[in-house]
Image: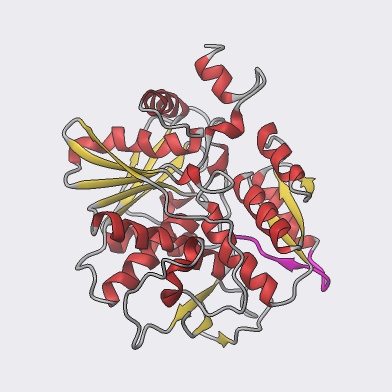
Amino acid sequence: MADYVVRCRVCGRTYGRGYRFFRCLCGGVLEVLVDLEGVSWGVDEGALGIFRYSALLPSLSRYVSLGEGRTPTIKRVVDGVEVYFKLEYLNPTGSFKDRGSALAVSKASELGVTEVLEDSSGNTGISIAAYAAYAGIKARIYVPSDIPVGKYVLIKSFGAEVIKAGSRDEASRQVLRDLSEGNYYIGHTWNPYFIEGTKTIAFEVYEDLRSVDYVITPVASGTLLLGFWKGFNELLKLGLITSIPKLVGVQACGYDSLSRFVGRVVRSECREGTVLADAIRLTNAPRLPYIAEAIVRSGGYLVVVNDDLIVDALKDLFRMGFTVEPTSAAAYAAFKLVRKELSGKVLIPLTGSGLKYVGGTESPLYKVFVGG
């Protein structure tokens, strides 16, 4: 694994590998800078999960892995456009978040942490709870009060303490109020190691496809989009690719926090805020300016979709055989909205599993497919 430093994106202050606070002393967002000097592309096929890319990951004393990554990429031609669906819902706990959790919990373990705190709409909470359980670390997860019941049950099943805290934004505020010296905030909205895990998705895209022209992905805290951005930039520095794909961020009506930062916004009619896309109902992500920067510098833009479009996209994806959650369908809904201007290869990560929504007449899948 590679040497690295942790640097503040606001003031530029750097920290060593023993730094435990989730942000800079100035309040800024931190990032991990891996030293690529003298590093060459290589894959350790004997390593588990994302740690097969150890040459490009920060050096850690312990790996915590449940075999995340290496998800299939399925090609479909949709209205003449080559679309590559990356099935991230096949990760161990059913979402791409397992990539970030593997790195973040590995770092927590290296620091000797005994309890981690996380705020989440559901998927990250499930993932952190599972990886923490595997590592023998306690977990306390702060969630919105209307978290889908399947996600709530899974977090509890992994032995985590769950705190329901009003809205998704309120969960983010309450977890910070409850921080103390005896615990460690692993929150993916701030944690710099989390993105080191999610960037491995770009490495897999390179292995499978070499290059793509567009990546269309849902955005809340931005860990996936920023992972793509960082991963592709590292591939560029290594001379393995010649350009960065255009990054198209997708948000849902009522939660389009990127609109004020991104120049171009393609917007569906928004009469009310989304109910279906529960995984992207976040408005106060600390990395918003950096997400916008990645979108703009890549030549991409923002698409805002409503629940009607998400329902149609969800039905399409299930008819293709993809067991996805509504937020995953938001990305395909965005594709359908802008597909006439797309050409070349389009990658859409299907971010979360629909199996977490099965059961009960209040489930969005029940309402879409059964209750009509």
- Say whether residue 334 is visible: yes
| Residue 133, x across and y down, in percent | 73, 56
Q: How is the image coloured?
A: secondary structure
Say which quarter of the image contains residue 131.
Answer: bottom right
Q: Is residue 215 magenta?
A: no
| Residue 42, x across and y down, in percent | 34, 73
For the point 51% across and 55% down, the residue is: 68
Viewer-proximal residue among 345 and 6:
345
Per the picture, the main secondary structure of the magenta-coloured stretch is: loop
Viewer-proximal residue among 53 and 190:
53
| Residue 319, x across and y down, in percent | 38, 23
Left or right side of 126 for 351: left
Left or right side of 5 for 113: right
**Image vertical order of residue 85 relative to residue 185, above or below:** above
Viewer-proximal residue among 351 and 207:
207
**Image vertical order of residue 289 relative to residue 93, above or below:** below
What is the magenta range? 179-188
**Image vertical order of residue 347 relative to residue 20, above or below:** above
For the point 65% across and 17% down, the residue is: 361
Say which quarter of the image contains residue 178.
Answer: bottom right
For the point 29% across and 77% down, the residue is: 237
Left or right side of 212 for 124: right
| Residue 333, x across and y down, in percent | 37, 33
- Say whether residue 172 is visible: no
For the point 56% across and 42% down, the residue is: 279
